[in-house]
Image: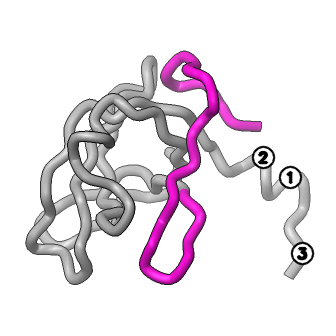
């Protein structure tokens, strides 16, 4: 299925900074609960299965790229409000992030 340019422009990808990280023991697969500051868009929550390559300490303060306009998704007792993006190699996910610090909320185009 081909994706049109118009379809692509509907996906709102933004840069945000992880401001809080918690273990998510209720998740079906190992995951963290993330709170991400997207500047003017506010702080959004995400459940991320990124425990293979990341520990909580290194995630805190990291800038990440996420889709912020998907519908919220209930994951166990947690409401995920955005989708953090990463390159997936089996169960190992490498997060996408800018290679230099940018303002929170900056749109990816």
Residue under pointer 2: 9
Tag 2, which secondary structure? helix
- Image: 3 above or below 101: below
Provide residue 95's location: percent of width, then percent of height: 51, 53
Figure colour scheme: one colour
Provide residue 34's location: percent of width, then percent of height: 27, 47
- Image: 74 above or below 84: below
The circle drawn on residue 73 is none
Residue under pointer 3: 2
Residue drawn at the location 63% of the way across and 31% of the way down: 99
Residue drawn at the location 56% of the way across and 71% of the way down: 88
Q: CA distance from mark 3 to mark 1?
A: 12 Å
CB-based contact (under 8 Å), mark 2 and mark 3: no
Tag 1, which secondary structure? helix
Residue under pointer 1: 6
Residue drawn at the location 57% of the way across and 36% of the way down: 14
Residue drawn at the location 55% of the way across and 76% of the way down: 89
- Image: 99 above or below 71: above
Provide residue 32's location: percent of width, then percent of height: 23, 58
CB-based contact (under 8 Å), mark 1 and mark 2: yes
Q: Which residues are magenta?
A: 86-109
């Amino acid at each position: 299925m081909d994706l049109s340019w118009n379809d692509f422009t509907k996906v709102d990808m933004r840069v945000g900074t992880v401001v809080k990280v918690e273990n998510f023991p209720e998740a079906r697969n190992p995951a963290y609960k993330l709170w991400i500051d997207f500047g003017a868009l506010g702080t959004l929550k995400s459940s991320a299965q990124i425990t293979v390559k990341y520990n909580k300490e290194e995630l805190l303060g990291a800038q990440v790229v996420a889709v912020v306009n998907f519908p919220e998704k209930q994951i166990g007792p947690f409401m995920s409000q955005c989708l953090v993006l990463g390159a997936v190699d089996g169960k190992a996910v490498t997060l996408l992030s800018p290679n230099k610090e940018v303002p929170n909320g900056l749109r990816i185009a």
